Image (tube, rainbow, N blue to C red):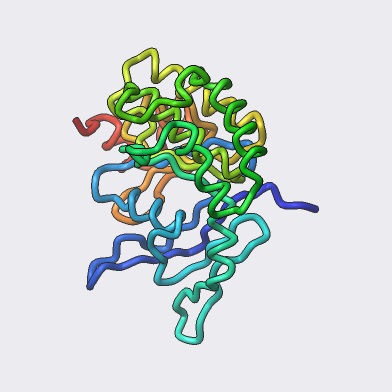
Amino acid sequence: MTSTRAVSVTRARKSFDSREVLHDVSFGIDRGEVVSLIGPSGAGKSTLLRCLTLLDTFDEGSLSYGDLEVTSRGEDGRAVYDKEAMRQARMRFGIVFQNYNLFPHFTVMRNVCDAPVVVQHRDKAEVEAEARVLLDRIGLSDHADKVPCQLSGGQQQRVAICRALAMKPDVIYFDEATSALDPKLTDDMHRIIRELASDGMAVGIVTHEMGFARDASDRICFLFDGQIVEDGPANQVINDPVDPRTRAFLSSPED
């Protein structure tokens, strides 16, 4: 039977100097599922996201994307990363950064098409045709020849989404998907995320917006002091949390 798990982490640990930032974390997202990571500042959300996207590495534990095992266990118990598996894994996920990270001197079209052509060595005309479909889907077809400074923040975010989707990933991550967006754009982001999930993509979100996490997600994981202390259906975690640390956090949300 084929597994539906698109990304999986098992018993991960990560330390900086003598401070353990992630402690025995197990986490996963199924295909077609939206999972939000919530928790106070310093809980380890950003570190977990960096390790999931191979911008950093776990000290211990396993990471896999579908049937692709990115790590193995070394003789000393440390996580050993396979370079070829890391290269392949980078083709299986995309990420939309909080500040979008668009190339300021590239047009919208080139921002979307550059990586599939340069990194994946795909046919330029084919990639551009697919990019136009993506841009049309999220309402940016009239902006293909503009550069980022000519776009609003919400439009830049949509370009970043198209750029991630152009790589045809199995998993897409959003780092603070709704930061600085007005209510209308937040609703649009909710719709886009649910559409991606309905297409079978696994979606991971790091967010401080509890309402958005509840409405957009299938599951929510609450990360506290480097551990996932609660993992359950979105409505249950937000409206009726089990762990007292989750209840305390949700009753006194951060500004």
Q: Is residue 206 visible?
A: no
Extreme-bottom residue of the structure: 75
Q: Front-most of 232 and 37?
A: 37
Residue sitting at x 44%, y 71%:
60
Extreme-top residue of the structure: 184
Extreme-left residue of the structure: 255
Q: Is residue 255 left or right of residue 228?
A: left
Q: Is residue 223 left or right of residue 219?
A: left
Q: Is residue 74 left or right of residue 211?
A: right
Q: Front-most of 219 and 151?
A: 151
Q: Front-most of 139 and 226?
A: 139
Residue sitting at x 48%, y 64%:
11
Assign the C terminus to one quadrant of the image.
top left
Residue 222, position as x, y percentages in the image: 39, 43
Relative to 106, residue 216 above or below: above
Relative to 144, residue 55 above or below: below
Q: Is residue 165 visible?
A: yes
Residue sitting at x 32%, y 53%:
44
Residue 17, position as x, y percentages in the image: 23, 72
Q: How many marks?
A: 0
Q: Is residue 212 left or right of residue 69?
A: left
Residue sitting at x 61%, y 45%:
170
Residue 101, position as x, y percentages in the image: 35, 42
Q: Quadrant of residue 148?
A: top left
Residue 228, position as x, y percentages in the image: 41, 51
Relative to 103, residue 86 above or below: below
